[in-house]
Image (cartoon, helix red, strand yellow):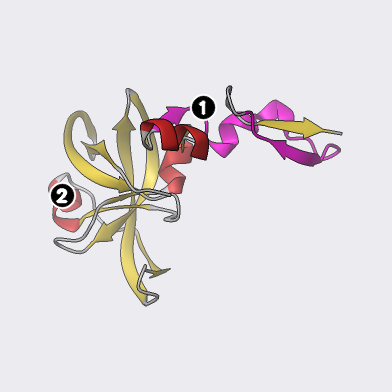
Amino acid sequence: MGTFTQKLKIFQAGDPAEFTEIEALVDTGAFYTWGPRQTLEALGYRPDGRRPFVIAMGQIVERDVCEIRVALNGDSCTTKCVFGDAGGTSLLGAYTLEGLALGVQDEVFRRRRGATLVPGQGMSTFMGANWIRPDVQCRKWRTEVAGWPRSVRLR
């Protein structure tokens, strides 16, 4: 998959009227969103925990994390964010994409138009609460070439 960036608003802690916009690399392989430590601290965020991560080079690193409020394409959510190193790449991870009900367009559309985010493509969006029942199992994924979202065939 190709890479692309997206502008992401990070709201100030305790004041949703104030925000900073960052350019983040969309990385569906990253679970959490990563933001610059200095930006997060300037917005009033403080670490509420520390977690280990395996970074792209294969190293295991420990980083501070906290809950932040973000917005993209007019929608907002609260999400976990990792305090990144100064000068490091900001990442928009899968956890945040799911919270915003966004996903990356499928291969056919990426080849034609370049990769972009689309609404309603998050796993939890097309697997809505009314579809998840303990007595029903997903039998087959089906991707429609001309009309997404993907659908789930239930038995």
> Is 133 part of what is drawn in magenta?
yes
- Outermost residue on the bottom side: it is 59
Q: Is residue 126 left or right of residue 87?
A: right
N-term-proximal mark, 2 vs 1 = 2
Q: Locate residue 138, reporting x and y percent.
A: 78, 40
Above or below: residue 56 compared with residue 135: below
Q: Is 114 in front, or is 52?
A: 114
Mark 2 is on which residue type? Thr
* Magenta-tinted stretch: 117-144
Question: Alpha carbon of mark 2 to alpha carbon of mark 1: how far?
Answer: 29 Å
Residue at image coords 23%, 56%: 89
Identify the amino acid type marked 1: Gly
Q: Is residue 109 magenta?
A: no
Q: Nearer the viewer, residue 115 or 103?
A: 115
The residue positioned 77% from the left and 32% from the top of the image is 153
* Residue denoted by label 2: 39
**Front of the two marks 2 and 1:** 1
Residue receiving disc 1: 120
Point out the image quarter for the C terminus.
Answer: top right
Up-down relation of residue 65 to residue 44 (above or below): below
